[in-house]
């Protein structure tokens, strides 16, 4: 990296920051500047039709891009819209948030200009860097900017963004940086991620539920699944699914870990019903829920269906809810929660190691019907059929 002492705007885009190593430079930029040293990653995908004076240059960049980045397809592509909405909310001050540094790559070595205490890395006019980490965020910035009104564009264009520019390194090294930045980090599991999300209105209900007996200190935040010997009753993810199903019915299982829309919901009402109904179930069937070795009463699929029964309570007149809860608990008292053939095809299947419960998405609908609908073919099948020994 050649160090100059003359600031000459004609040489290119001057990005202000600090050198970390001879080949890496950390900086605070803005989207207005960032958009002059990058292209929308969607323009660099395979199969894109290109035209215009720089079509050949873009095609060459696209070929390089394919060597150091994964394609913007599947979950990565689907995430752009949500990330753009998040960026928009943060930039417009609608919510607190954080935008991680975007790591950019330039194969040519870039010059640095030092003027007094300030350092600038110079990206020559017409040159573009590519994202080796944070590409989804970069594409989301382009989409968010496009969708904003003029005053929003001004706010987004000048919002401070952190970047790290890696330059003067070849393609194999850039590929290795992509690997190191994306593979070495360990993503938190779903339960921990959900537990940390204070922006989800339904998670606030979950937080309040955790402070109420019988769930106090009995919710697992760290692990994705409960060990058989755990004294916890359920994971954060499962409790959240129960709350969603109280609000939305059994169809709430389709949201999974995604945010569930709350428009039109009285959240205070949802919380009141969730506390009463979920608390009643855990009080009534505490022993069966803890006996994970022989019963399915505490499995995520069963709890999702039980949560959906709370939606029945939610749609009952407030003065009649206590009676409806008692009626539904009475129905559940007759259920044979023991793992076995009577649950095959409803909650799961028999396997070599015993009965295996399916996921909530796979089983909750069938379980809900068997628990609540007396005309359902499985209603009597899951009720007590075993004579006392």
Image (cartoon, grey):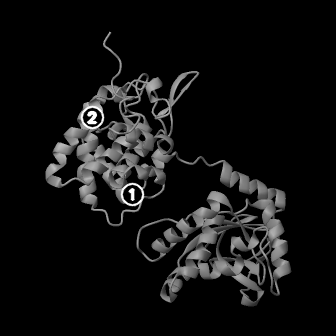
Of helix, strand and loop, which one carries label 1? loop
Q: Are marks 2 and 1 in contact (CB under 8 Å)?
A: no
User: In terms of sequence position, does the residue under pointer 2 or pointer 1 come before the other?
Assistant: 1
Residue positioned 80% across, 86% down in the render: 52
- The location of residue 53, given as percent across then percent down, is 82, 87
The tag on residue 272 is none
Mark 1, Cα crowd under 10 Å, few <14 / some 14-19 / many 20+, is: few
Q: Nearer the viewer, residue 230 or 81?
A: 81
> Residue at 66% across / 47% down in the picture?
184
Task: Answer left or right for 344 relative to 163.
Answer: left
| Figure quadrant of the C terminus | top left
Instruction: Pick the residue in front: 67 or 327.
Output: 327
Residue 128 higher or lower than 73, as above or below: below
Instruction: Please say if 321 is above or below 199.
Output: above
Q: Which residue is mark 2?
A: 331
Q: Position of residue 147 (x, y in %)?
A: 55, 80
Query: Is residue 59 in view from this perspective?
Result: yes
Q: CA distance from mark 2 to mark 1?
A: 35 Å
Query: Which label sits in the foreground, 2 or 1?
Result: 2
Q: Is residue 101 left or right of residue 36?
A: left
Disc ID at residue 198: 1
- Check the picture and name the quadrant holding the N terminus: bottom right
Locate residue 9: give its quadrant: bottom right
């Amino acid at each position: 990296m050649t160090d100059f002492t003359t600031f000459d705007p004609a040489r290119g885009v001057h990005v202000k920051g600090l050198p970390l190593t001879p080949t890496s430079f950390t900086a605070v930029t803005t989207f207005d500047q960032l958009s002059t040293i990058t292209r929308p990653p969607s323009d660099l995908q395979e199969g894109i039709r290109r035209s215009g004076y720089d079509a050949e240059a873009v095609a060459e960049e696209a070929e390089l891009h394919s060597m150091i980045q994964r394609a913007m397809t599947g979950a990565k592509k689907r995430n752009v819209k949500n990330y753009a909405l998040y960026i928009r909310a943060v930039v417009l001050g609608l919510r607190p948030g954080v935008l991680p540094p975007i790591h950019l790559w330039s194969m040519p070595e870039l010059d640095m200009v030092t003027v007094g205490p300030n350092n600038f890395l110079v990206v020559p006019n017409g040159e573009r860097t590519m994202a080796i980490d944070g590409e989804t965020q970069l594409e989301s910035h382009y989409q968010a900017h496009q969708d904003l009104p003029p005053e929003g564009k001004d706010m987004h264009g000048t919002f401070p963004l952190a970047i790290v520019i890696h330059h003067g390194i070849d393609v194999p090294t850039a590929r290795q940086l992509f690997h190191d930045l994306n593979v070495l980090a360990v993503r938190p599991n779903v339960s921990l991620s959900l537990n940390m999300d204070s922006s989800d209105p339904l998670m606030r209900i979950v937080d309040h539920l955790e402070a109420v007996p019988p769930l106090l200190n009995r919710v697992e935040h760290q692990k994705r699944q409960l060990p058989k010997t755990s004294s916890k009753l359920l994971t954060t993810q499962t409790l959240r699914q129960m709350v969603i199903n109280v609000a939305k019915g059994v169809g709430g299982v389709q949201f999974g870990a995604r945010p569930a829309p709350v428009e039109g919901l009285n959240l205070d009402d949802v919380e009141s019903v969730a506390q009463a109904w979920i608390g009643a179930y855990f009080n009534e069937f505490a022993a069966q829920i803890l006996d994970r070795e022989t019963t399915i009463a505490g499995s995520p699929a069963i709890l999702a269906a039980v949560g959906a029964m709370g939606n029945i309570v939610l749609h009952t007149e407030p003065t009649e809810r206590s009676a409806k809860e008692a009626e539904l608990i009475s129905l559940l008292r007759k259920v044979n929660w023991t793992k076995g053939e009577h649950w095959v095809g409803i909650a799961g299947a028999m396997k070599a190691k015993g009965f295996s419960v399916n996921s909530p998405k796979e089983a909750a609908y069938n379980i809900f019907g068997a628990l609540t609908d007396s005309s359902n073919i499985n209603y009597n099948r899951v009720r007590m059929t075993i004579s006392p020994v």
